[in-house]
Image (cartoon, grey):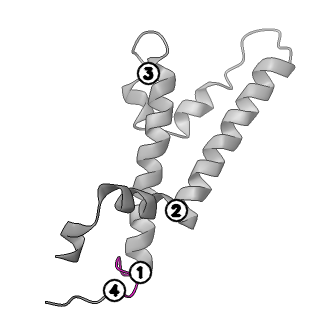
Amino acid sequence: MAAAQRSAGTTFRRSLLNPAALGYLAVVAAVWAWIAVDTLLVTHADASMAGVWGFFVTAPTSFLFASLPGPLPLVGVAVGALVQALALGAAYRWATGRPSGHGRTSHA
């Protein structure tokens, strides 16, 4: 019954606020910072392929958006990062065996 009463926002927050999910989001942010530096500050004789790594680090979800027109591929990268972070967070909570209630008892 306690799981049914938990809001979606609480579950979302618990899945994102753990070391695995936050570490993954830090890696994604670092890759995109590297892409920005490479694009803006480094001169190349031909085109740089650095932008591809933004899709690789958030694959496979971001690849679903890659062939869409306009800015939608970049939306796919953000969605991909969020989906993978949620999955990693859920896997982390399952692997560490932490109870979801944090000490709450059921009064059934």
Circle 1: element type: loop
Quadrant of the rendered image containing residue 51? top right
The quarter in which the N terminus is drawn is: bottom left
The quarter in which the C terminus is drawn is: bottom left
Report which residue position mark 3 lands on: 66
Discs 3, 1 touching: Cβ within 8 Å: no
Report which residue position mark 4 lands on: 104
- Region rendered in magenta: 99-104
Discs 2, 1 touching: Cβ within 8 Å: no
The picture places residue 38, in percent across and down from the top left corner, at 79, 25
47 relative to 60 in the view: left or right: right
**At x 42% / y 54%, what residue is drawn?**
86
Q: Residue furthest left?
A: 108
Mark 2 is on which residue type? Leu
Label 1: how many residues lie within 10 Å, few (<14), some (14-19) or many (20+)? few
Report which residue position mark 1 lands on: 98
Task: Determine the main secondary structure of the stretch shown in magenta.
Answer: loop
Inter-mark Cα distance, 4 to 2: 19 Å
In front of the other: 104 or 78: 104
Inter-mark Cα distance, 3 to 2: 28 Å
In the displayed structure, 60 sits above or below 84; it is above
Determine which of the numbered discs, if any, sits on residue 17 in the image: 2
Circle 3: element type: loop
**At x 75% / y 34%, what residue is drawn?**
34
Mark 1 is on which residue type? Arg
In the displayed structure, 22 sits above or below 39; it is below
Which label lies toward us, 3 or 1? 1
Inter-mark Cα distance, 3 to 4: 44 Å
Residue 89 visible in the picture? no
Inter-mark Cα distance, 3 to 1: 36 Å
